[in-house]
Image (spheres, rainbow, N blue to C red):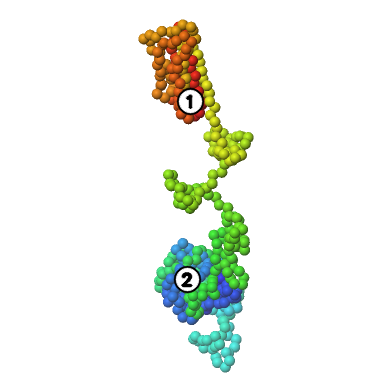
Amino acid sequence: MVDILVSRPGFRDLQVRYVDMADATFAEKIVAVNPDGSNIGGGGGPVDVSDRAARLLGIVYGSGGQLQQNANLNLKTELYVGAAAIDPRSIRTLSAAAFDSVQAVGSAGAILAQRAGTNELETEVQRWLGSVAPTVGSKISANSIPVVIASDQGAVSADVSDRAARLLGVVATVTSLTQMNGVAIQMGFGVRTAGTQRVTIATDDVVPVTGTFWQATQPVSIAAAVDVSDRAARLLGRVYGSQGQQITQTATNFNLQSEIAVGGALIDPRSIRALTASDVVSAQVTSLIPGSGATNLGKAEDAAHTSGDIGVLSLYVRNDALVDLTNADLDYGTPTVDVKGRAMVREQAVLIATTISGANAAVTLTIAAAGAGLFHYITSVEIINVNPTAAAIAGSAVTLGYTSTNIPGAPAWTAGNALAAGAEKVVERIVYPSGGIKTTTANTATTIVAPAIGLGCVCRILVTYFVAP
């Protein structure tokens, strides 16, 4: 993690002090940068940074936090004099017409004094330098006489038309600066060009930098060539997760610490093991295709039986008391058996409908409607004419006709009218096969109609049936 960025006197480079994350020790690196940002190299040789984005190892921090960039990726800096921030837009060229003045400060920290009226610099020569008399011209510091201007001396004006030749001290305030090295300065912020203003940070100063740091606009080099194949030894930052928290490692072997969870519940990995025969695994099955092969539970419709076929045994329930096993009509049910394991079936209750006419009168046998969804199942029909008198009925050209309703095919019968005294004549006596004949319409009455058969004679009709859907 970077601690501070400082510059070295007389060099165009940055001195970086950072924390080596591998052993938590401090180290310093010298970073050299050419004025145009090219030919970047360190003390140990050049470093290829043509693909900075691929080798960025972390985030650069100053003493106050992470260094920042503006929207076009330039490093954000601020100019200060002491604790006061300087607006670079107020920098302009010094002008005699604007009465700009420059105060020169001596080595003792006081302003150099001038002679009143003539504005000459006041000096006092008190001693020889060794055995050599002072002379004019440039001298090294060992052969120069220090000059002190009185602390109560007024401001000393200076001709700054040739600043490079006569800069006497510290410039207190620069109100306008339009060129550097003969190139116009771009004020504010912008991309790195020959006209962009450069800032040098003092070696004993720490400058907070704000903004978004972007590797594509921050070329740096270090004092020695670095083998970036070992990134772990030179990690410059920390890795954070989506929740803004630093990802942690174990203290000894530096393995990434992680947890196993299902939903919000943490799982202890020590409980993970291979399943054994004693383990119980629950599974929810929403659909099942059993297949139809010999070893499958399912079988295809109309498939022939083969010895050894696999299937599912049907279970029946013994129900001696014949209690209800389902809750409502149309519910799924279970077959029942008796004590001997014999399947129980319901015997249909046989009903009888019968009627007899009056002497020489027509008659209709009516079976009432069975109810919603129910039919009559006719199992037998019997129609008999009876002469209970002593007088015989002579035959004639009359044919007796008998009809029915709600029976499939609407069966009808006929008979002659001759009938001996005290005799009976069977018009119809039929028993239908097992299951009977199902009537045509549910919940509808079924009828058989007989005519009057002659003087003193009666007709008797008898039908057996059961009711079912």
Q: Position of residue 225 (x, y in %)?
A: 48, 79
Q: Along the line of sight, which residue is nearer the eye, 253 or 153?
A: 253
Does any portion of residue 354 appear in the rendered image?
Answer: yes
* Residue 35 location (% of width, % of height): 44, 75
Q: Is residue 249 left or right of residue 421?
A: right
Q: Earlier in the sequence, mark 2 or mark 1?
A: 2
Q: Nearer the viewer, residue 343 or 86?
A: 343
372 lies above or below 179: above
Quadrant where the N terminus lies? bottom right
Residue drawn at 45 percent across, 15 percent down: 425
Q: Name the residue located 57 percent from the left edge and 81 percent from the top edge.
A: 147
Q: Amino acid at mark 2?
A: Arg
Q: CA distance from mark 2 to mark 1?
A: 98 Å
Q: Which secondary structure lies at badge 1?
A: strand
- Residue linked to disc 1: 379
Graded by Cα atoms within 10 Å as few (under 14), some (14 to 19) or many (20 or more), the crowding at tag 1 reads many
- Label 2 Cα crowd, 10 Å radius (few <14 / some 14-19 / many 20+): few
Q: Which residue is label 2 attached to?
A: 55
Q: Residue at x 45, y 48 (%)?
A: 305
Asked whether, in this view, residue 397 is left or right of residue 252, the answer is left
Instruction: Identify the element where label 2 is drawn.
Output: helix
